[in-house]
Amino acid sequence: MSGKASLIKRIAYRITVPKCVSCKRILQLDQLAVCSNCYSEYLNTKDRSCARCARPLESCFCANEYLEKHFVKGLIKVFRYRVSPDNRVANSLIYRMKKRSRKDVTDFFSDELIGAIKNSVSDFSDTVITNVPNRKSEIRERGMDHAAVLAKAVAQKLGIEYRPLLVSLSKYAQKSLTAAERLSNADFDLITDESLKGKTVIIIDDIVTTGASMGKSATMIKALGPKRIIGACLAIAYFDK
Ligand SMILES: [Zn+2]
Ligand SMILES: [Zn+2]
């Protein structure tokens, strides 16, 4: 970092005095989003393996059945989302990213997601990053689409193209619905007819619960003719069978 950039960073830090999104302790300069105690807790949350391939979640490329049937070749994920005290820090980070954008939270999560993406994808040539779009009313309410913010940050850091491809036509927020209702509610439309021939598309979302939103997004994108479609999310929260 240049002297000027680091000076600006120090001034910004003094003005904002960022606090840990989980325990509210004041962060040190250079700490992103969480303090060192909460970061250790977050690492414990991440320390789980996939029941199918036995790899740590961050290195697992398994999708669920619904995604596989809907053209998603593999699903990259960082941790498992659960409403549990064990997930306190991870959940605070997700909550914060959705409710109010704080640049260091986006920075933190985009680094985390890039780490997991690199475990499964090594060649980024002809790759396009997009996101599962939020509902229009949610975007209006929050002033941003947090999945798009995350996807753009990941694309920028990896030096690959971010391209918005979809708009959401879903009537209700997915989290308010049962698994079956999510399937009929998830509804997307393409905003472009530009060909994706020969491209790999990475579709980013924050949490994948049933896979309905990501699977339906992939189905629409498939019509643009990409070579392969990969999903990438911060957390999986599959309904337990
Ligand atoms: Zn903390
Ligand atoms: Zn796996």
Image (cartoon, rainbow, N blue to C red):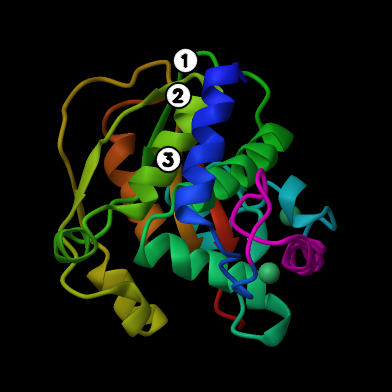
122 or 21, which lies in front? Answer: 21
Residue marked by disc 1: 126
Q: Which range of residues does the magenta coloring cover?
A: 26-51
Q: Earlier in the sequence, mark 1 or mark 3?
A: 1
| Element under disc 1 | loop
Residue marked by disc 2: 227
Q: Is residue 41 magenta?
A: yes
Residue marked by disc 3: 151
Q: Earlier in the sequence, mark 2 or mark 1?
A: 1
Q: Is residue 174 magenta?
A: no
Please tell me which residue is depicted at 65% across the width and 60% down the height of the picture: 34
| Element under disc 2 | loop
Position of 235 compared to 222: left or right? right
Please tell me which residue is depicted at 66% across the width and 43% down the height of the picture: 30
Disc nearest the viewer among 2 and 1: 1
What mark, if any, has residue 160 been given in the picture? none
- Tell me where residue 73 appears, x and y as whole percent: 55, 41
